[in-house]
Image (cartoon, rainbow, N blue to C red):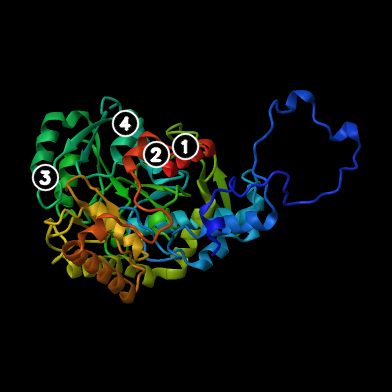
């Protein structure tokens, strides 16, 4: 690899007057090709001047810095980085899907509407819900939509004073954020030492504030990867005060094929399609957060919704854009969310089928417990027992050398692994959250386990190599605090700083 092309900025490769193209002069006439003076820049546009090969090689080399599931193991806890079958990408790229305009008349896009309709039905069956909306474009967007459905339900019943949401202290950060955006107040319920909800604390909250509670938001299994065994009791307590149960579907993977949120007593839920149903999550999107509701709440779902009717023996799919009952909460998105993600989720569900999709949950649980049990003698496991799809270590078991969770994560990069989620959840000081996902082979898991054990051994025998990692990446250990407080956002600032560092 050419280190100059790999390590330099495109501006450093620039040479005055050099171009990557050669085009003939326009022959449309002077008057038609000149822009009006008011549209012209007052100063010269500062762009790099490079030949074509330099540009291509530079950006091709830069692309090698990217990391994803196609490159290696991605054990990112809390946010499932699943493998996305290539066939799903090909199906989502079919011209019949990609060339559809959002305003295409329903009669000309029956194939797309049928896909959405059948996806709604599949999600309802998999979760035990009565109906789904595909509108929300992300998980947090789904949370907001679900809470808006809950508010609409209470307001329709004349209980607009219910403005509080109970949320466990171990919840994803989006839960309290979504509640706040929806105009609701968060009431925190404590966790027990085993990471599950403190039912007695929940009883106290409901006894004191139950008449003001709109809902309780829960993730099951929770953020620690622990199954909430007291769900039946929790749902009874919340329902007894007239509130609803909201299921955060971020951790749905281990539930598929084993149990359904609707059967547990949840009234509203969202699904992160980009986590559980094949689209790799990470890098800012795209996402999708369909919202499902139990029977009796369907009329509050937002528009548009895909419906179907039979006409002369043929099924006709329609896009319902309004509800004459005026009970719908309105619109949270003009179209049906991120359609590309919907196609991939549909392909994933249909290709696995009724039989194989039942294996997703058990395999996610098996892989996580295999890794956990293989490492708990060298990494601190604060909560013993069976986990579901993910687990949390509290740093190294032997902390005498001062090697931190951050050091372990940085050292993993030297061995070609993406680091797991670190310092979250906040319940433990040195949290290291691992989620292997159901797709990985035993050989891949064994390779990761071996590397984690090697790092634990290095922490004892050669701690400096861990504390100064990474050593094999294009950029070494950076000063995270300085980068946050004094970010370098322009080429001129970077050049100035590089010159200063070089002179020292």
Q: Which of pointers 1 and 4 lies earlier in the amino acid sequence? A: 4
Residue drawn at (61%, 59%) of the image: 57
Q: Residues within 10 Å of mark 4 (few under 14, many from 20)?
A: some
Residue drawn at (35%, 70%) of the image: 440
- Give the position of the N terminus as an image quadrant: bottom right
Residue picked out by circle 3: 198
Residue picked out by circle 4: 180
Answer yes or no: do the residues labelled 4 and 3 have beta carbons within 8 Å? Answer: no
Q: Which of pointers 1 and 3 lies earlier in the amino acid sequence? A: 3
Q: Which of pointers 2 and 3 lies earlier in the amino acid sequence? A: 2
- What's the CA distance linking mark 1 and mark 3? 34 Å
Rendered view: 371 above or below 49: below
Q: Residue furthest front?
A: 503
Q: Nearer the viewer, mark 4 or mark 2?
A: 4
Q: Nearer the viewer, residue 144 or 496?
A: 496
Q: Secondary structure at mark 3?
A: loop
Quarter holding residue 82: bottom left
Q: Position of residue 335 (x, y in %)?
A: 54, 43
């Amino acid at each position: 690899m050419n280190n100059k092309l790999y390590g330099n900025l495109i501006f450093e490769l620039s040479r005055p007057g050099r171009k990557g193209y050669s085009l003939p002069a326009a022959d449309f006439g002077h008057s038609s090709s000149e822009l009006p003076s008011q549209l012209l820049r007052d100063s010269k546009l500062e762009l790099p001047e490079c030949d074509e090969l330099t540009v291509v090689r530079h950006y091709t080399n830069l692309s090698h810095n990217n990391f994803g599931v196609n490159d290696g193991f991605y054990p990112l806890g809390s946010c499932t980085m699943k493998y996305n079958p290539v066939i799903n990408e090909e199906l989502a790229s079919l011209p019949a899907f990609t060339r559809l305009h959002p305003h295409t008349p329903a009669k000309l896009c029956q194939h797309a509407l049928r896909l959405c309709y059948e996806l709604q039905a599949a999600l309802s069956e998999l979760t035990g819900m009565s109906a789904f909306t595909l509108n929300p474009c992300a998980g947090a967007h789904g949370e907001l939509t679900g809470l808006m459905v809950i508010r609409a339900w209470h307001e329709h019943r004349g209980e607009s004073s219910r403005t509080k949401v109970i949320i466990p202290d171990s919840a994803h950060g989006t839960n309290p954020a979504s509640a706040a955006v929806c105009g609701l107040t968060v009431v925190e319920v404590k966790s027990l030492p085993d990471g599950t909800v403190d039912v007695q604390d929940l009883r106290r909250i409901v006894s004191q504030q139950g008449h003001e509670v709109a809902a309780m938001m829960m993730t099951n299994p929770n953020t620690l990867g622990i199954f909430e065994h007291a769900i039946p009791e929790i749902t009874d307590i919340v329902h007894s005060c007239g509130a609803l149960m909201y299921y955060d579907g971020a951790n749905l993977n281990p539930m598929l094929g084993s149990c359904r949120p609707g059967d547990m007593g949840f009234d509203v839920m969202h699904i992160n399609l980009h986590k559980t149903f094949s689209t790799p999550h990470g890098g800012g999107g795209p996402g999708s957060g369909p919202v499902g509701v139990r029977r009796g709440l369907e009329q509050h779902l937002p528009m548009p919704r895909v419906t179907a009717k039979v006409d002369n023996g043929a099924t006709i799919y329609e896009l319902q854009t309004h509800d004459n009952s005026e009970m719908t909460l309105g619109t949270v998105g003009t179209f049906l969310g991120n359609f590309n993600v919907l196609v991939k989720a549909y392909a994933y569900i249909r290709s696995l089928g009724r039989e194989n999709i039942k294996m997703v949950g058990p395999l996610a649980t098996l892989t996580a417990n295999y890794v956990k049990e293989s490492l708990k003698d060298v990494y601190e496991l604060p909560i013993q027992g069976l986990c579901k799809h993910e687990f949390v270590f509290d740093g190294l078991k032997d902390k005498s050398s001062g090697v931190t969770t951050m050091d372990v994560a940085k050292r993993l990069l030297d061995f070609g692994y993406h680091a797991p989620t670190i310092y979250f959840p906040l319940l433990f000081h040195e949290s290291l959250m691992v989620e292997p996902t159901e797709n990985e082979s035993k050989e891949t898991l064994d390779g990761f386990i071996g590397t984690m054990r090697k790092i634990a051994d290095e922490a004892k025998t050669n701690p400096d190599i861990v504390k100064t990692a990474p050593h094999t990446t294009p950029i070494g250990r950076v000063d995270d605090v300085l980068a946050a407080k004094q970010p370098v956002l322009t080429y001129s600032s970077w050049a100035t700083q590089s010159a200063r560092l070089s002179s020292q």
